[in-house]
Image: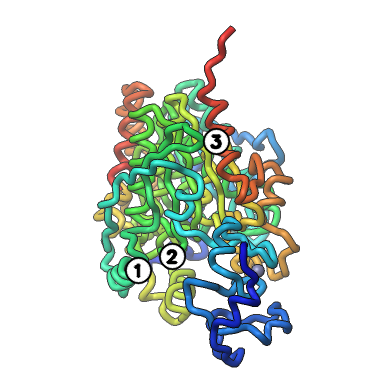
Amino acid sequence: MSFNFNDIKKLFIRKPKNTLEGTENSEQPTNDSEAAHIPDKLAEKCEKCGQIVLSAEMEENFNVCPKCGHYKKMTARARIGMCAENFSELFADVEGKDILDFPGYAEKIAALREKTGEKEGVVCGTGEIGGVQCAIFSMDYRFLMGSMGHAVGEKIARTFEYATEHKLPVVGFVLSGGARMQEGIVSLMQMAKTSAAVAKHGEAGLLYVAVLTDPTTGGVSASFAFDADIILAEKGALIGFAGPRVIEQTIRQKLPEGFQRAELLQEKGFVDRICERKDMKETLAAILKLHCAEVSE
Amino acid sequence: MSAYDIVLKSREKGRPTAAKYIKNIVEDFLELHGDRRYADDRAIIGGIGYVAGRPVTVLGIEKGEDTNDKIAHNFGCAHPEGYRKAVRLMKEAEKFHRPVLCFVDTSGAYCGIGAEERGQSEAIANSILEMIRLKTPALSVIIGEGGSGGALGLCAADEVWITETSTYSVISPEGCASILWKDSGKVAEAAERLHLTAQELLKLGAVERVIEEKGFSTEFYEGLKADIAAFFAKKCTESGDELIAARYARFRKF
Ligand SMILES: [Zn+2]
């Protein structure tokens, strides 16, 4: 950055600490007494360390907090933007159905659409990564934490079907708290539907790379997330079948440090490689390049 | 009966477990153990036998009968090894062109440290993926609780049948009430809203057949056995590719 954060901060009106937005927690350092109230788009508060960071600086640092290294959650489109060029969206019109007429669900979806500008929890399309054309899907935490209902499953299945038809590799940015329980059994069936589409794509000899991000749990983790040929995991991501709280309640003990984190999954043999966010694009490009290399003898 | 009454019934003490179905439907059952990777998970029992003279591979998620038996079978909550054993036996069935019959009864796959560290997600994902592209017929019968991903791991079949007081759901009504409404008093309402009963599932197309229980009498097992035999007789005339295409369409419609 060409300017200093302290200089910028002076431009804004100081307000008492207790008016700051965001989650206050015990881990918050005590030396942020000079924290200022800063307009939304110029600066933000790190959700982990609580320190104020310039948004431009955060973005330049791949949405990793420059103060503490925390990985800020990224929207589906921001993630695609970080890794791919010439993205062209597909299946944008696929919408969910409130098939069970579940109380409050239709209203919730309508409000999320309004708030996020997205119709559902996954963005799909084609684009280039390192010059290699591929099909891409990217899940969005803002939409009920990327939970999988009909629309999410349908878009992902269609992405694999499209990729099979056009002989393209698939790169998937996975983020999900699991099933969309408001859609009941239809939500569960998405696990089988997406898996079937992945299987067909794989049988055509095509590559599927999954990037597991924080969090990847439940029905999504127990289906297409772990069906990939190569599984990358973002540093520190929570990855598991059951959520940590459910496990703690079941076994009635505290979980060890680092449990269900990407690093432990690599150690136990369930992810191919941990990837730092800043290296994601290059890593994906290298994998894609190798898979379309032609060998001249 | 309300949806919640059916939920309670599906978990009722003394309800026949998978072992009882196998005993009554599968002739000369020979149990085969282990996933050839790590362990033998007793929550999923598997083996070979005959249904009306036809060789089959059988899998059952077993809750156990008395207290010691329940503990031995981990109350029907499988670890990754259970799903890996299931896949091993399914692939074996495929090799020898015999159909796969699954009895499903689980509140869900086990949640615990070991299960997570040994890849519960990967094991279930792989079981769904392998079952859905199996080149041999597969039929799943839900006989109690069809609990979420743990049940689906053995339900990626050509058809799924369910006995009339069984359930199949993405989440337990207790889980739904506490996560969504933060109110454990709303369990009965959650059961209703989730449409998890046999009749509701039939309407939604999630199961093909609801089986009358007839008090779990001899007549019940004989009837079910005849239906299973007829189903396999029909499906065994189809090629592997036809089976896979039909299975694809079955799940694609959701
Ligand atoms: Zn921070």
Visible residue check, residue A38: yes
The answer as to whether the residues below labels 2 and 1 share one chain is: yes
Residue under numbered circle 2:
A142
Residue at 32% of width from left, 72% of height from top?
Answer: A111
| Location of residue B244 with respect to A135 vertically, above or below | above
Depth check: give the residue in front, B70 or B180: B180
For label 1, the SS is helix
Depth check: give the residue in front, A232 or A96: A232
For label 3, the SS is helix
Which quarter of the rendered picture does the N terminus of chain B lie within? bottom left
- Kindly report the distance in space between the C-alpha atoms of the residues bearing marks 2 and 1: 8 Å
Residue under numbered circle 3:
A285
Residue under numbered circle 1:
A112
Q: Position of residue A175 (x, y in %)?
A: 50, 55
Residue at 54% of width from left, 21% of height from top?
Answer: A293
| Location of residue B10 with respect to B129 vertically, above or below | below
Q: Report whether A288 appears left or right of A87.
A: right
State how many labels appear.
3
| Residue type at numbered disc 3 | Ala
Please state the chain letter of the residue tagged with numbered disc 3 in the rendered image.
A
| Residue type at numbered disc 1 | Leu
- Kindly report the distance in space between the C-alpha atoms of the residues bearing marks 1 and 3: 33 Å
State which tag comes first along the sequence, 2 or 1. 1
Q: Quadrant of residue B64?
A: bottom right
| Location of residue B123 with respect to A52 vertically, above or below | above
In the image, ligand 1 is in what quadrant? bottom right
* Label pair 2/1, CB-CB below 8 angstroms: yes
